[in-house]
Every structure is written in C-alpha cells, then in structure tokens.
Amino acid sequence: MDKHNELAEHSNHRYGKYILVWLGLLTLTAITVAVAGVNLGSITIATAIIIASIKSYLVLTVFMHLKSESKTFKIFVGVAVFFIIISLVLLFSDYSNM
Amino acid sequence: MSTQEHTAVAHLHRDDVRSRMGMWLFLFTELILFGGMFFLYAVYRFLHQADFHVAAKSMNILIGTVNTAILLTSSLTIALSIAALQNKKKILSLILQGITVIFGLLFLVNKYFEWSAEIHHGNYPGSPELISQSSGHILFFGLYYVMTGLHGLHVIIGMVVIMFMMRFTIKDVITPDHIVKLEAAGLYWHLVDIIWIFLFPLFYLIT
Amino acid sequence: MASDAAAVHSNSYETYLDYKGKHKGIFAWILSTDHKRIGILYMVALLSWFLVGMALGGLIRLELLTPGRTIVGPQTYNAFFTLHGVIMLFIFVIPGIPAVFGNFFLPIMIGAEDVAFPRINLLSWYLYIIGGILIILAIFLPGGAPDTGWTFYIPYSIRTSTNMIITLTAVFLLGFSSILTGLNFITTIHRLRAPGMDWFKMPLFSWALYATGWIQVIVTPIIGITLLLVIIERVFGVGIFDPALGGDPILFQHLFWIYSHPAVYIMAVPAMGVISEIIPTFSRRTIFGYKFIAYSSLAIALFGSLVWAHHMFAVGMSDSAEFIFSLLTFMVAIPSAIKVFNWTATLYKGSIQLDPPMLYSLAFIFLFSIGGLTGIIQGALSVDIHLTDTYFIVGHIHYVVFGTAGFGIFAALHYWLPKMIGKIYNMKTAKVAFWITFIGFNILYFPFFIMGWLGMPRRSYDYLPEYQVYHVISTVGSWIMISGILLMFYNLLKSVYTGKRVTERNLWGGETLEWTVPTPPPLTNFEKLPDVTVGPYEYKQNDIEVEEVK
C-alpha cells in the first residue's frame, strides 16, 4: 500500500512538472517566432537551431523520461546525436570549401 | 505462433527495460531517417541561401505556429495519459489518449489547408510555375513537400498506434503494471514532435 | 530440408529440429519465432541467392572472355553486373553472418533462450524475403532488369526506364530487415546475458555482432531515406537530386556512401568475429589480446562510419574534404591491423589443426590482408585518382567483400553447420573443395589488380585487345572457383541428408557456450541456464574433454 501511495504521489507531482514543461515549450515557440521577425543576420539560423535544441532536450528528458533512464540509454542517445552532428560536419568539409 | 509455449518460457521474466531499449533504438532509426533529409536541407540551403529566403516567404507562419502548439500540447496529453494510468485513473488516461489523437487530426487538417493553398498558388512538384523558378526555389519546395509529407505520415502512424493503445487500455491489456506498450507509443509520439520542432523554424522562419 | 532429417533423431531430449508445435510441415518453420529456426530459414534463402549471384558473376566473366560481344548484348550485360552487385551485397553478404549464424548462435553464446524480440526477428526474415521477391519481379516485369550498377547513381537511376522503383523498394525493405536484426542483437546483448556473463566474458563473435548491430541501426536509415527520395523523385517529379531540377547528384553520392561504406563493415566485422572464434579453437590457445580485438570491433564501427567520401575522391570534392577523408581512411587500417596481428599472435606456437573451418579462416586472413592493403593504396589521394573506376577497385572489393564476408560465411558453415544439424560433412571433400575455391579465387581476382593498374575501366562491356590475356586468365579462374564452391555446397548439402550423425557436444574443442549444449541444440538451448564463471577461450583453466571427430 505504501508503495502504491508513493507512486500515486509521484504521479501527481509529475502532472505539474509536465504542464510546466509544456508552458516552457510554448514560450520557447513564441520566442523563436518573435526572434524570426527581427533581422539578426547570420545568427538567425543559429538562434532557431539553439531554441529547437533546447525544446528537444526538454521533450527528451522530461516527456520521454530520459532523465530517469539508466546511463546506457543516455549513451545511446549520445551516439545517435553524435553520428548526425559528425556526419553533417564531415559533409560540410566538402561543401563549405568549394 | 507455433512456438508460443516456447516464447512464453523465454519471457517468463518480463523485462520492460528491454522493450524500452528496443523502442529507443527504433526511434534512432527514425531520427536518422529524417536526419538524412536535414542533411539535404542543410546543403541545399547553404548553396542557395537567397532562393530559400524568397521561397519561404510564401509559407504561412500562423498555420505553422498553430500546428507547433498543437503538437506540443498533444505531447503533453500523451505524457499525462501515461502518468494518469500509473495513477490508476483509467478513464482519465483514455480521455487524454483520445485528445492526443484529436490533436493529431487537427494538425493534419491544418496541413491539408496549407498544402491546398500552396498547390493553389502553383507551388507543387512538376507544376509549370515551379519549374520556371530558380533551382533553390524548386529544391525548397521539393524538400518542403517531402519532409512535411513524411512527417505527416508519421503523425498518421502515431495516431493509429495510439488508437490501438486505447483499445488495449479498454481491454486491460495495458494496465498500471503492464504499461510499457503505452510508454513506447508515447515515445514514438514525442519523437514525431521533436522532428516537427526542427522542421518548423527551418521552413517557416527563415524569411 | 533439415526438417526431414529431424525425424531420424531420437535423442533423449527434444531438439529444436524435433519440435512439433501448432503448425505442421513448412509452417512449423516459417511461422516459428525460435531464433535457431529463423537462422536456418535465413541460411536456406541466403545460400540460394548466393548461387543466383554466383551464376550472374560467372556470366559476366564469360561475356568478358573476348572483346566485344561474346554471349549477350550490352544492355543485358549492364543488368548482369547490376543484379550481381545488388544480390551479392544487399541479399547475401550484408544480412550474411548476423542473420544466419548470429541468429542461431548469439543467444546460445551469451546464455540466453532466444533473442530479445523473437517476433520482430521473424518479421525481419519476412522483410528480407519480400525484398528478394521484389528483386525477382524487377528482373522479369516489363521494363527490364535494373541497369544502373548497384550504386544507383544519379542521374542513371532517375533517367533509366528499367524497373528502378521496384529495385529501390526491395533494397529499402532489405535495409529495414537489417535494422531490425541489429536492433534485436543490441538489445539481446544488453539484456539477456546469462548470470555471470559480463561484457568481457562474452565470446568475440558477440562483440563483433554488437558493433555490427550499431552500424546497422545507425547508418542504414540513411540509405533508406536516400533511396526513398529517389523513388519519390521518380514518381512525383519532386526536385531533390535531379540536376535538371537544381539538385546535386554528388549529394546523392555522399548520402549513398554514408551508408554503403559502413556497410562494408556490416559484412566484414561479423566475419572477423567468426575468425576470432575459429582461430583459438583450432590452435588450442587462448586468443591473444581479447580486449584489443573486442575494442577494435567498436573502433572499426566508429571510424568506418566516418570515411565514406573516400569513394568520391575523383568527383571534385574540396581539398580539405579530400584530406580529412583520406586521413580517416588510413585510421581504419589501425583497428583492422590490430585484429590481424592478434590472430597471428594466437597462431604462434599454437598446436594448429588444419580442419576445413581453420583452412577457410587462414584464407580469410590472407585475402583480407591483400584486400586491406590494396584499400590503403587507394586511400592515398594521388594514387586513387589513377585507380578510380578501374578493375583495381573491382579486385579490391572482391578481395574485401568476398575474401572476408564470403570466406567468413564458408568458415562459419564448416565450423557450425554440424552443430546446427547434428551431422558432419566429409572432411576430405571439404578440404579439396577449399583448395579449388581458394586457388580459383586468386586466379579470378588477382588479374583485376594488374588490369586495373594498366587502366582497364570497370563495368565496361568492351575492352582493348591488350587486356584480353588478363580477362581470359580471370574467366578461367571463375570456372575453377565455381567448381570449388559447387563441390563445397554439394558436400554440405549431402551432409544434411546422409551425413554421419554426431552427438558429441564439443565437436572441435571450442571453449564457448554453444559447445556445452547438446548437438543439435535443444528447443530452449540450455537444460539449465548456465552460470558463467570463466571467460571464453581459457584453455588452461577449463579442462573440457575434447572429442575428436574423424
């Protein structure tokens, strides 16, 4: 019984956390739209990507419970993200010097 | 299955971590599938920066923003539905799953209007109007249709999966103690959301 | 098939071959989720496809016997080499060792009762079969067999009027099948190891499959999306790669090789794993540098995924890209060489038994060394410009792919097939077949290096008379090699039907877990789940009785 109550309490706590994260995500969306209206020149795309990464991080860690998963899962995600980034960098070693 | 008895033996000890691990690995393949298209986008945008800016002008930022909000909210509802079921609130969980599916549908309806408008403007693959434009313009719309189209397909798959989960929840196949199927469906839905989080600024906010 | 042979068995336990489930006959196999039966299903399909691919290869060689037309016209010749490549790579070697021997032995080797997701395992076999059926359709449907080469380069694959969409869909499905196998193995190794089987007590074959699993999961989606985009481009006329619509064909090559280079390691790393099992068994020695071999699999997986553009040195990439990719290419040689040195060190002062699996393994090391060294030659930029698109590359690819993955499969077949079916093949015939195959292989492929160096372009239907002597030698070599392989297959097939029964658990004196279970393995692999206390290959500590097979 105790364990069940604990779980329930834990879940109640989670409702609040999820809603908080959701509000954060909406705020970040508003920011990225607002910033797009301002001409930031070359850092426009960087800002957009950084905000999108923060949003993804929130979804990954909270909604997808990556935070409470074991270290193995975190390394897994690291491997996938590393592959995408390093491939993009290597790809641009060709295109950025044409 | 012919070896049902056998697999029953092999799976005497249910292992939720195993199921989640399989799901995460599958999500990586989805992520990298879209990653390949992001590579294309990055290179073409780099090669045709001015064209991409001009082409993106015809994007409807309002619909894009609304759709972003819809998907983010649906991510919230599916996450809440899992928490609700763990909290032994079956009805609430079902309602939240249902809302998620409805949000998915709303997203697709918006997408439909958006695509219709573009097609009405003559911006569709192979149209004489698009062919007459610059290379960057053609590529922008090519990527736009392919990436949002494949993303839309994933939204549809996600909706179907969640509808199955609703059925499982009703039939008590998914219970607070056997929740890993719903969790996996949730993971899939969140991934679809993450992909949109990147698609949105890259197509709508680069004018 | 093996199911007929199963009835003969009257073991005290129920083997996976005896098992009578809900379904009868063929359905007891194609609806089975038992990893051992799925392994056998893959084996039957794979080896059948291999014979088709080999026949096509033989026809290519025959056509090239004389300059100009010998047996077929240029269009048919293009279809021949395209199908030869597609079948051998996507249907034979890429699924190859993991799908057959990984499925069958990985769970047993780490002390598990099955893979992590048995039903997904069966699904991946079905995707594989559907992929194969689509290839057959692509050959025979009106429109004609694909003629672009197995690389599907743009703009050929957009412009050709042959059955491109079906072919690309087939490769897409085969890729999906490969992903599911990889996903299954990674999860199996993480979650289903027996008590006491920690990471560094795992056999090296499991390490190899683990590294391969990661390559499969991480890079295969890239080829999936690339081919899917070509299909979309063909069907809807969307501008993506087509230069007429502003696309960049070189970008297709980048994406294609992001997968297809690591795919070489999907073929080679499991084969290296097989060799790492066989070498210690037949030299009665602990493997030298266990951890180095284990880590070098991971290192190959990592570096191998980052060197794709060395296939494109001649397309006009930027200087910095050429430099980076050339450097990374040389770095892959390091973990590969570590393996070769460790194998050789294991052999040193071992009491070597030259049984057929060992012969194939030694041939593997020899052919892999030639393949690897010629690879390094091409990794050097200036030399590569000279060698690009010549027969040198064709020689290299055959030494690397056939010499490693192909010979790895042959080695594994001779090592594990008796365990799988409980029957032993004729040793003498196996050795004769080996020598014919090995000698034929070198007569067939070595002239490719010379021709290539002299400038003979690959994929050419016609050639200048001065190259004919090499082509004739090579074609004669193909006849020798094909005879050897047919003899080998005949010998193995014969053993399935009329081979001598074996019931010894440990056929060769191996030290890994699969040799501790009965032959053929029981339905649930183990009578009692093992509690592992010692590492693999520990010949001094373990005193397992070695039962000689005559």
Image: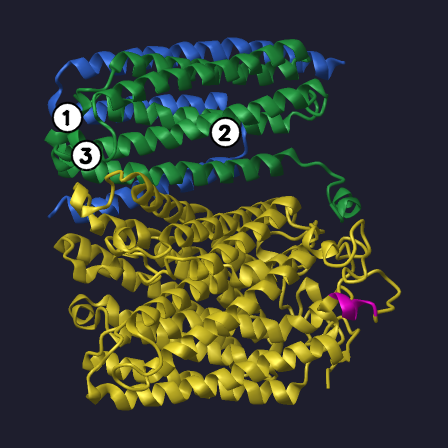
Marks 2 and 3, the one that precedes in the sequence: 3
Quarter occupied by the C terminus of chain C: bottom right
Residue C449 among magenta residues: no
The chain coloured blue carries which letter? A
Which residue occupies 43% across, 73% down? C56
Q: Chain of mark 2?
A: B
Disc 2 element: helix
Marks 3 and 1, the one that precedes in the sequence: 1
Task: Give the image location of residue C177, x and y in percent.
Answer: 52, 50
Q: Which residue is mark 2?
A: B157
Q: Which residue is mark 3?
A: B138
Q: Are marks 2 and 3 on the same chain?
A: yes
Which residue occupies 23% across, 48% down? C251
Crowd tier of the residue under label 1, counting other residues whose Cα lies within 10 Å: few below 14, some 14–19, many 20 or above: some
Q: Which residue is mark 1?
A: B53
Compared to C254, does B170 lie above or below? above
In the foreground, C150 or C334:
C150
Given the image, on which type of amino acid does mark 2 rest? Ile
